[in-house]
Amino acid sequence: MEPLSSCSFFCLLSLLLFSSTVASAGSIGVNYGRVANNLPPPSKVVDLLKSQGITQVKLYDAEPTVLLALANSGIKVVVALPNELLAATAARRSFALSWVQRNVARYYPATQIQAVAVGNEVFVDPKNLTSFLVPAMVNVHEALARFHLDEAVKVSSPIALTALQSSYPSSSGSFRTDLAEPVMKPMLELLRQTGSYLMVNAYPFFAYEANADVISLDYALFRPNAGVVDAGNGLKYYSLFDAQIDAVFAAMSALKYDDVRIVVSETGWPSKGDSKETGANAANAAAYNNNLVRRVLSGNSATPLRPHAEVDVYLFGLFNENQKPGPTSERNYGVFYPSEEKVYELDFVLGSSSGSNKGGLRWDEERGRGGGNGGVRASSTGESWCVANGMAGKERLQKALDYACGEGGADCKSIQPGADCFQPNTLEAHASFAFNSYYQKKGRSIGTCDFEGAAYVVSQPPKIGKCELPSGY
């Protein structure tokens, strides 16, 4: 743990939230979905994963070309047995054995398969496949054991939060009555006996979108906030994500399975949405994912209810997928466009970029605010820019602009009346110019493009009126 004198505000906040004597470090992976007709070939995707330092990937099938491309890459892989195969897998051990032989044993260990996700959100599948789930998981585990892979390759199944009967407050978390005894209890027993973990798909975005009038955006995006006290256990929550995960932990505890780990198999935030999808934009997506990644990798992956837990997280997803059905948001969860350009700036590792906090310390520590959104330095070979978040509101933008041009030392001469970049004479345009000046002068260090959520990082060169924002000073 870094000393307080060199820790960003986000780190300080994390220390307050998770004050256990031993910090738990989780890991970050990414979901590689392929419901699109414009994605790069698997070999290029693997190169992209490696270039970003991504060491874990979760698939939604066991596509041979993808598994072959991942061979000898050093990337750990979760493969999936699709929902449509659950009935056959549950009914016939021979089918499970054949599936494991073709989709796991054939590729292991060159392809480092570490788990099989048996089905995906089975309880919400309209075909009512719930009764097949646990028998299918048992047969897949037994098939792995036949190939002596059961120690290396775990079996689980991602559940959605709709599996909960109650989730608020977190302490009241419980599984649906139709699932608790007949499905969840035997599933959790299997996970316990095999040393596996429960996969959970958690999306604070959905809860925020449906309740934006009562849920704070800062609470949903891991930003500094007043917190929410759980009346049931007295614990204070500073993030909606933690509240959701602890609701699942509470449901597991009610069934006496406190010792089974959770892995967050999906979570993310869309960069674009329909007009009614409140909060779906690139600034919020950058804030959510950057704050979550930074938190997990800096050793703060525990939750208030499980202060010593180690929670691994898989972001959703790698690419925007243009053939996914549903609202606009469904096609805009990707960190990357199919062109392999970033939708917004995001680092998957804490390396040299996280070690250089000098640029953000005066804003974060001396002023006692700011800290964590998408202000992560670009990769060593790429460029990035800092722009204003118009959704932050005039008051927050003005306060941040005043700081950047004043105490922050940004070069704001070009946006004075009569200067080259004064037009367009809008708060958002002037703030973008000032924020970018501050960000670039501070070496694009972590935390220097946030301003209490008033800014975020982009990887495409922005143009404000006739002025292009510089990428370095």
Image (spheres, rainbow, N blue to C red):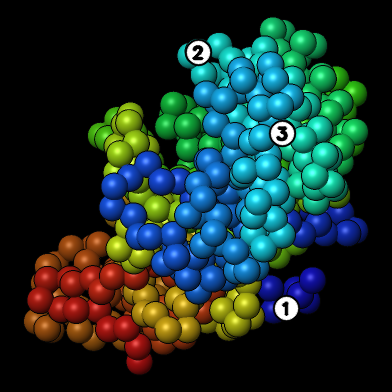
The mark closer to the camera, 2 or 1, is 2
| Residue found 77% across the figure and 59% down from its top | 25
**67 or 361, which lies in front?**
67
**Label 2 packing within 10 angstroms: few (<14), some (14-19), many (20+):** few
Distance from the alpha carbon under mark 2 to that under mark 3: 24 Å
What x and y, as percent, mark residue 31? 53, 49
Residue tagged 3: 97
User: What kind of element bears circle 2?
Assistant: loop
What x and y, as percent, mark residue 336? 38, 59
Mark closer to the chain start, 2 or 3: 3
User: What kind of element bears circle 3?
Assistant: helix
| Residue found 45% across the figure and 65% down from its top | 43
Where residue 329 sits, quadrant-wise, is top left
Mark closer to the chain start, 1 or 3: 1
Question: Disc 3 residue type?
Answer: Leu
Question: Disc 2 residue type?
Answer: Lys
Question: Disc 1 residue type?
Answer: Ser
Residue tagged 1: 5
Where residue 286 sits, quadrant-wise, is bottom left
What x and y, as percent, mark residue 60? 52, 41
| Residue found 87% across the figure and 54% down from its top | 20
Compared with 225, 202 (above or below) is above
Residue tagged 2: 127
